[in-house]
Amino acid sequence: MALLNFNAAKAIFLQFSFQALGLAAALLISVLLAFKLGAGIESDIFFLARRVITGFTEAINKAMVVVYIPVFIYAIISSIDRATKLLTRSLIKSSLLSCCLVAILLFLSDEMVSLLASDQTLEQQAQTVSILNIFILLIPAAVVSVVLQGFCKAVGYFGTSEFGKLFPRIFLLLALFIFTPSDQVAILAYAFVVGYYVFVLYLLVCVLRYLRAFQPVGSNEQLNKEGDGLAKRRGYAMIIVLLASQIGIWLETHYALSSGEGGLSLLEYAQRLGNLVPGVLSFSIVGVFYTVWCREFALDKGDDIQAYLLHWLAIGLLLIIPISVFTYIYADSLVYLFFYNEKFTMDSVEQSALLMQLVIPAVVATFVVNFLIGWVLANPAFSILKIISIYAALDCMARLIAFEIFSDRYGLNGVAIAISLSTGLMMLFLIGYCLFFKRGSATFVYDALLLKLILIPIVVSLVFFMSKLALASQGISLTLELILSGGIGAGVGVLLLWGLRISPKHLFALISRKER
């Protein structure tokens, strides 16, 4: 069986399942942190140090995986020798690069903390620097893991890297259970770093096993000849995206810290809970879509993909929108259920719930942004460097202006508003460019299926609103209300799929492009 001919339904299911498991572990970590650290200076120090590095590594992950997936696809289509040599060279280069990054960041850690946490005392800044230096040590593992993850996705083994990401979180959970809060922050950081290196070892073992069963897909004659040039352009474009992403994270962190003690922690809790399910779905769906697009263009079979681009987007929003609406409606109940304790008081619950509602629009907008960026990077017809450079510049300016205006006027709430507003503006920019200005000669297909895919999430979202109104006056427990409302909405969604004769098999055939 050729390794590139993967089943899209299975790929999305595996990607989502293991990511959901990882995010559930992350949520449990947040719950334990809320119980042991609350929302104060100690939690701010931990979240600041972790945000700076994990934000950096996650940006590298997204950027480099986007580059490595199509590169490995071209190599795999050619021969096992080319794929193995490319993998070896990439691992050596990424190891050397990561060591240089560690040296640079260790040298600049004092300046970074002074810049981001200017409102902290010198003692607090010194403690933050010590925790940050521990997290910096995970960068080599994070960079090397990106190469291995790209290879796994290229051969169609989705879920492998998502399962492996459980290891850092498992180590972190063990540290939270074993050690007391007084000595916990530094130990938590060390536990997370050790878990990341275990994650890399797991990926390496998986890749070696995959290479033994490797079967080439075809010959060089099948390839789109623009592949090598595209790889370079994708690489440069993702460096730009990486820089823009880091600037956004740093601005968000700086303004949240400037809002007062515990501000960053409250925002972190809100984002973690609000982005739990929609974020997992978004990453899973876009990751599989992007791999399919790269495969089609690599085999020079992507002429009519654009015609069904709106269908692909609608399939993603079919799940993202209703779940985001449900999270918005029940924000206060979810925050209370997961985080409320003697250290995370009702004031913290109310503030975090409001922040969660304010950032929910950014969750939906982020999916659309990632979807369209993936489309730009996969499609050889786009001027990749041009559009990505414009996007990055506008994104940084929008965030800076929005944070400056809204954080001054509304404090921590303004930071959340700025996140949603700036992300929404970038969504509109990419929609305008990709779907209208640069659509080329291709014509989008507007059919009954597309209309149904748009209608279903709207109806389900309305059902969530109505069930909230109906159940709020019944005097039932929060947990039961959440279960009933979610069940009613999901049931209506299933009935709509059945009544409108939309088969999941049909949707996944559209994604996999096996029946057209």
Image: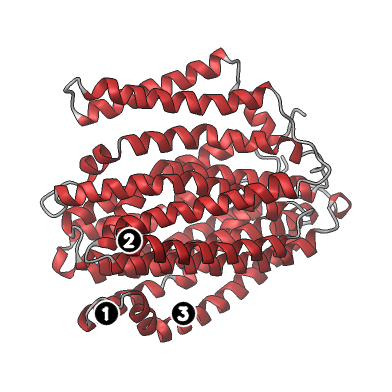
How many numbered marks are there?
3
Q: Residue at x 69, y 48 (%)?
A: 434
- Residue type pointed to by label 2: Arg
Q: What residue is shown with label 3?
A: 102
Where is residue 465 drawn, in percent x and y? 36, 27
Residue found farthest to the bottom: 107
| Amino acid of disc 1 | Gln
**Pair 2/3: label in front:** 2
Q: Is residue 471 left or right of residue 116?
A: left
Residue 347 relative to residue 284: left or right = left
**Residue 249 locus on image (x, y percent):** 44, 65
Residue in the foreground of this view, choosing between 445 and 144: 445
Cα separation, mark 1 vs mark 3, equals 20 Å
Helix, strand or loop status at disc 3:
helix
Quadrant for the C terminus in the image: top right
Residue type indicated by callout 3: Val
Q: CA distance from mark 1 to mark 2?
A: 26 Å
Residue 81 in the image, given as x and y percentages of width and height: 75, 62
The CA span between labels 2 and 3 is: 38 Å
Label 2 or label 3, whichever comes before in sequence order:
3
Residue depicted at x 79% and y 43%: 302
- Category of crowding for the residue at label 1, using alpha-carbon neighbours closer than 10 angstroms: few (below 14), some (14–19), many (at least 20): some
Of marks 1 and 2, which one's residue comes earlier in the chain?
1
Tag shown at residue 409: 2
> Is label 1 in a helix, a strand or a loop?
helix
Does any portion of residue 447 appear in the rendered image?
Answer: yes
Q: Are marks 2 and 3 in contact (CB under 8 Å)?
A: no
Q: Which residue is mark 1?
A: 125
The part of the image, by quadrant, that contains residue 220 is bottom right
